[in-house]
Image: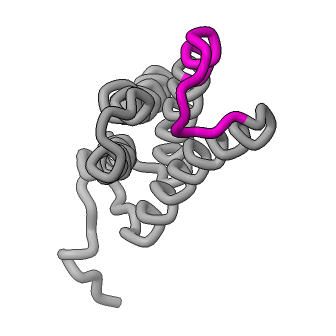
Amino acid sequence: MAIRLSSVRGKSEKPEVPQMQTFLAVVAGYLIFAGSAVLLFQLTKVEPHSPAALGFEVLTIVYGLGFASLGGFLAGKIARRMDLGCGIALALVIALGATVSMIGRPGAGALTAALLLFAPASLAGDWFRRRRQNGA
């Protein structure tokens, strides 16, 4: 029985994560983030791109930060990656969506929050997952 040398991993090498698993994990993370936003605006009956009271804007920012972090955390967990690849990919997807929306609707403050706060929060969620994983 022969063992191919290319299939033998050393102790320091990490197992490879299938690309499709990573892709689906990032999609799941985005659905958590975006789905929660849709749910919030549906339940409160507030138009997402219209001006709102300051209290509601603060609530949506805190809410968005929480769900962006949760999305990043769960994306990394689902993919079982050892690096921050899912958090980075999710942050890029959120940032891209915010940038496209900002171009389509100039002056929308909520979109700026998505770009400057929610995208980094998704990366922070994956970072927290990785830190917990390494500490356990």
Is residue 52 rendered to the left or right of residue 89? Answer: right
Residue ID at (77%, 32%): 44
- Furthest-top residue in view? 55
Residue 25: give x, y in percent of width and height: 50, 57
Residue 130 visible, this orientation: no
The correct choice, above or below, for 70 with respect to 105 in the image is above
- Furthest-right residue in view? 43
Residue ID at (55%, 34%): 50
In the image, the segment drawn in magenta is 46-60
Residue 124: give x, y in percent of width and height: 39, 26
Residue 65: give x, y in percent of width and height: 51, 24
Residue ID at (50%, 59%): 27
Residue 128 lies in the magenta stretch = no
Image color mode: one colour
Quadrant position of the N terminus in the picture: bottom left
Examine the image and state in which quarter residue 118 appears. Answer: top left
Residue 52 lies in the magenta stretch = yes
Residue 26 visible, this orientation: yes
Given residues 135 and 81, the one toward you in this image is: 81
Residue ID at (34%, 30%): 112
